Amino acid sequence: MKRPVFKRFGELTRLPAAFWLLVTCLAASLLFMLFQGGKLASMLFITMTFLTVYLLSGNWSGIRRVQGTRKLTNASVEAKLEAGQSLQIQLGVQLPGYWPVPYVMIKDQLIRQNGEESVFEGSIVPDWKRRGEFTYSTPPLRRGYYRFGETECLTEDIFGFFQHKGRLDLQQPITVYPQTVTIREWAQFHQMLKGMQHHSTATSAHRETTQINGVREYIYGDRLSRIHWNATAKTGTWKSKEFERESLPKTIVLLDRTARAYRDAAEFELAVSVAASLFRYGTGREMSLGLLSIGKEFTYFEPKHSQHHYKEIVKHLVGVDADGYQSLSQIMKERSQDWPAGSLIVLISPQKGSAMLQMFQQMALLQMKPCHIWVHTQADQALGPQGVEHISSHEDYIKAIRSQGYMGYEVSQLTDLPNLLGGAKRYA
């Protein structure tokens, strides 16, 4: 029977000091009126009563039942952005009730997938309909998945005695994709195709398999066997089967996610952006591209050509981190046994030196075509374990790769990638 009493006493002790000060002043004015009497005492008690009612009624100001909406003014409903872009946000607030609210302090949170929080604060003055808008812009966002946390709304009385809080739960996911550039042509890749005794690049790139890849609009002249009858019946328009196209050779992109290989986060972001740009190019050219993401956990996508395949790879690239710890050469030795002969292996990595050249030689023995896209953001120094001979100059390293018949490119800025693959920059 005593526990409820103790519980209520505990709740009373948690009340703010301003509440007890207000109660004390009201009690003092009441005692002054009872024992002293007179007009002064009565006016003082009436004033304190009205003041107390006003201050305590703020607990029912409506801020706890605040309603609101969030609008992204520079993004689509799905909130898809590229890395480096800012997000402009408009937060609308509606306060129910009638208690006068002089202003509302707003605190909004944007949380990244790794737990990083960005807090945005501001204030609004509600209009006569008790509505207001808070607009702000985020700094340039990094690649990754984001979500909004709870939005905190706070107001005070005109004397600043009591604070009243409300919360808005406006969950909205945001995906920030890797930054990409448009690659018009990969000259050396298509020259390699012609050198492999194919009749023509276009013929081999458009040869169809028997694997159904999806449904497309009917094109006049399509054979009757290509008609997709189920899709035609559901949509009411003619639909044809879309078959997966061959791309010879199969191309596998290797993204090196070894933690110790990257100097900083910007260098890893450059590697991810290069990979995303290659897949964007390959999808537009109907190439069969695969991905081996070498990190703490291995993720492998078979070489295919489809929009769903492309979306799955980009979705993976959004969330990857440089968290690998195993030797790249050992991983390549184990994985390369499963790849078909004639495959083009595109390695995106900041590592270089004699060990990399030896790894490319082992690939060549397996009748594969290695290609190294060497990414870096600073002046290069020799990398790798002590005791191993290195090629200190990046130009010498690229020359050494190309002298052995392999493709090699040095990328220090993402904007240089289209010119490099198009053949604008060469090392003799």
Image (spheres, helix red, strand yellow):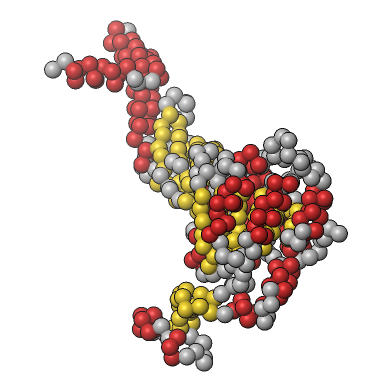
- Tell me the quarter of the image containing the N terminus: top left
Left/right placement of residue 88 relative to residue 152 reads: right
Using the rendered image of the protein, determine whether residue 18 is visible from the camera's viewpoint: yes
Task: Tell me what residue is drawn at x 53 percent, y 79 percent.
Answer: 208
Q: Pick out the residue farthest to the top.
A: 35
Q: Nearer the viewer, residue 185 or 112?
A: 185
Q: Pick out the residue farthest to the front.
A: 365
Q: Give x and y (percent) for residue 406.
A: 73, 60
Q: Give x and y (percent) for residue 185.
A: 71, 69
Q: Give x and y (percent) for residue 118.
A: 55, 39
Q: Pick out the residue farthest to the left.
A: 1
Q: Give x and y (percent) for residue 317.
A: 55, 53
Left/right placement of residue 32 relative to residue 147 reads: left
Task: Tell me what residue is drawn at x 53 percent, y 59 percent.
Answer: 338
Q: Nearer the viewer, residue 362 or 122?
A: 362
Q: Nearer the viewer, residue 133 or 4?
A: 4
